[in-house]
Image (spheres, helix red, strand yellow):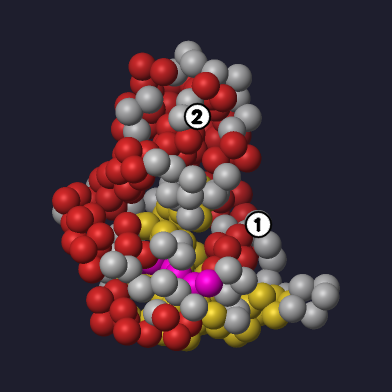
Amino acid sequence: MTDKKPIITVSNLSRRFSNGTVALDKVNLEIYRNEFLIISGPNGSGKSVLMKHLNGLMKPQSGEIRLHDKNIHNNIYRTRQEIGLVFQDADSQIIGQTVERDASFGPENLRLKRDEISIRVNKSLSQVGLQEKKDHRPHTLSGGEKRRLAIAGILAMDSGVLIFDEPFSNLDYEGVQNVLREIVTLHKKGHTIVLITHDLGKVLAHGERLIIMNHGEIVDNGKPLELLHKLESCGIRRPDPDKLENMTWLK
């Protein structure tokens, strides 16, 4: 159940690129503990730029982001431990020579004891169904398995907030099912989920709240099914009702 107190608060967040393009324009947003939040918008709407600000990869030109009511840049180490990102290109997050070594990278940076790292990594790999492939080289994994490996690395850091950027991009139907199942399971276990996507058909049935972005602004914020009629005017393809219903099998 979603906590009524926000875990992350975004206040008047703005970002302008060097060419004059406004990426974010006075964005205000609250993200609550244990909620499943979907952020959608057309290409260039600012959703991925917003994601990079949420754990400090980009620094606000103006405005502020607070985690547990403290500015995230006051302790960026803690921020990146608690708020984990899974990028659209999973290969960009894979650096280990084996699946096990890759999942170990985060907890090693936390300077945990070797026994604790081993416990966390084995647990996280089991959670995403990769324990039997711990000695495999990551490049031999499928696209869906690479996404799940990225998730395992974040889980091994004990991140409470998980942010996914287009997690179903370039996956076949089986890969979509496996990754979506893992995300839904993580939400049920108490993780806060922020899922960024332009393809709402796969996830709308699972989201508790939908944020619609356009031109660097939040143009709507509410229950997903209540905002369906506003999608096309913001450049977002409205999901096919039949496909939307087909994804409820995970509930």
At 32% from the left and 62% from the top, the residue drawn is 201
Residue located 37% across and 85% down the image: 230
Residue 119, position as x, y percentages in the image: 39, 23
Query: Residue 69 location in percent, x, y?
Result: 48, 70
Dot 1 corresponds to which residue? 57
Callout 1 amino acid? Leu
Q: Is residue 228 left or right of residue 112?
A: left
> What type of secondary structure mainly makes up the magenta span?
strand
Query: Dot 2 lies on which element?
Result: helix
Task: Decide which of tag 2 and tag 1 comes sooner along the chain.
Answer: 1
80 versus 200 height, above or below: above
User: Which region of the structure is painted magenta?
Assistant: 36-42
Which residue appears farthest toward the top when viewing the image?
Answer: 135
Specify whether residue 209 is painted magenta.
no
Image-quadrant location for residue 240: bottom left
Q: Position of residue 227 (x, y in %)?
A: 32, 81
* Viewer can see residue 108: no
Residue shown at 54% from the left, 18% from the top? 137
Q: Is residue 174 visible?
A: yes
Location of residue 115 in the rendering, given as x and y in whole percent from the top left corner: 44, 19
Q: Residues within 10 Å of mark 1 (few under 14, many from 20)?
A: few
Which residue lies under the disc numbered 2?
Answer: 103
